[in-house]
Image: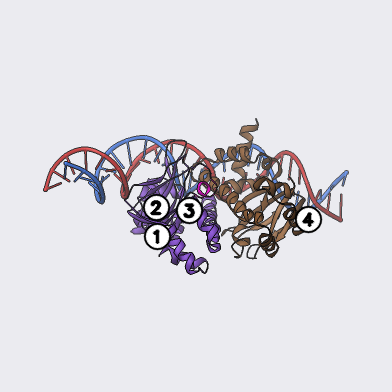
Chain colours: A brown, B purple, C blue, D red
DNA sequence: TGTTTCTTTTGATCTAAATCAAAAAACGCT
DNA sequence: AGCGTTTTTTGATTTAGATCAAAAGAAACA
């Protein structure tokens, strides 16, 4: 999905605003493994994913790499509390595949929002989408078994299971690699 | 904390806007156990808690009552995805104590937002606060032990441990009542 | 093409927390 | 104040998933 397309899904957009979006966002091609941000830094960009796969993660107290979320084509990705809330990020963003992204800086977005009312809706929309996703996660993590959580991910984002390394998926689900491997073995046979 | 006070924490507010807030919100006193909304309904109000304690919860597939969150004086509470996103609520809101609330309907808030720019920031602010809270929860639920999660709640919202019933707290932490009772026994002695 | 490195699978054992069951304590009500 | 209901505690047992260890497969690279 194209970025203007995405905006049009949320709200009708005037031609000038569309031109504004096109000039305000910058198209980027980045290779697998590149980091979009580091833990502790301010995240100054909002990215729209044209193609590819992005992972958000953090390093926990035991030094373990833990996946917070996966983001794919047609979605926005950033660290919302950092980008919108102007705080230091607690997460990293890394590319799990070569990606084509459209990025806008915080000030760039503010400019767009001042000039085009339609674009103001975006911030709220992105926040709401993030919130909905995180609510689902909590419900899953509170009282679903490892296998049920795997099943749920398989329903909501099936492609992740093929595209992301097993270790990353396991920590996302809150389980160990070994357990995930066993769940897979059970289902495939 | 008073409601205009709260707004002033977020952003400077003109006198007219302050008058608008005072007239736009309705002061309510509700008794313990009252429900502010049901699962499946649209949540049409945003509440600011002047005093008291509110619990958000859902009934899971096994028919078990599971606490999603606790909200106390000086905080806004609603089901954000329902109120802001105009969808049916997946959660209930119930009062765990007699509460004094200030409520505004969706259309009432829209009116205020049209008339007073300052108030537009509120939606964002409320969404961001919710998001921050839920992010923390995910991190806790992913890889902290039952006791560590208890400890974390004790740091972030210590009064909940005294004010809410044990069963409600246990499900919030994603553990059984018995386990929570044992954790308590260990620490108190 | 073989060697090194990283990822996934498989196996054996252990443990945190669930489940089942029942007693004790606290609360609500007339 | 006393009785029934709900909530919390305590105990015994079970289990899902962690941990430890090592083999098997893939990918990376010279």
Residue at the spot 62% in from the left edge and 54% down from the top edge: A121
C15 sits to left or right of D29:
left
Q: Residues within 10 Å of mark 4 (few under 14, many from 20)?
A: some
Q: Residues within 10 Å of mark 3 (few under 14, many from 20)?
A: some
Residue at numbered disc 3: B108
Chain of residue at mark 3: B
Specify whether disc 2 shares its chain with disc 1: yes
Above or below: residue A3 compared with residue B22:
above
Q: The N terminus of chain A appears in which quarter of the rendering?
A: top right
Q: The C terminus of chain A appears in which quarter of the rendering?
A: top right
Residue at the spot 76% in from the left edge and 51% down from the top edge: A99
Magenta-highlighted residues: B79-86
Specify whether disc 3 shares its chain with disc 4: no
Q: Which mark is residue A27?
A: 4
Tell which circle, 1 or 3, labels the residue nearer the N-terminal end: 1
3 or 2: mark nearer the eye: 3
Chain of residue at mark 1: B
């Amino acid at each position: 999905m194209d970025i203007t397309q995405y905006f049009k899904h949320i709200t009708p957009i005037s031609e000038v605003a569309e031109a504004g979006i096109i000039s305000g966002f910058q198209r980027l091609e980045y290779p697998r493994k590149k980091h979009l941000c580091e833990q502790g830094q301010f995240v100054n960009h909002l990215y729209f994913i044209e193609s590819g796969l992005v992972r958000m993660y953090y390093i926990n107290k035991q030094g373990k790499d833990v996946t917070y979320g996966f983001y794919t084509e047609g979605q926005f990705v950033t660290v919302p509390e950092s980008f919108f809330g102007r705080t230091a990020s607690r997460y990293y963003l890394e590319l799990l595949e070569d990606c084509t992204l459209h990025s806008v800086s915080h000030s760039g977005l503010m400019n767009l929002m001042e000039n085009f009312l339609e674009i103001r809706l975006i911030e709220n929309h992105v926040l709401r989408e993030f919130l909905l996703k995180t609510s689902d996660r909590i419900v899953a993590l509170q009282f679903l078994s490892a296998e049920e959580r795997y099943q749920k991910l398989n329903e909501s984002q099936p492609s992740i299971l093929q595209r992301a390394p097993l270790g990353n998926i396991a920590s996302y689900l809150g389980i160990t690699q070994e357990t995930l491997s066993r769940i897979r073995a059970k289902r495939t046979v």
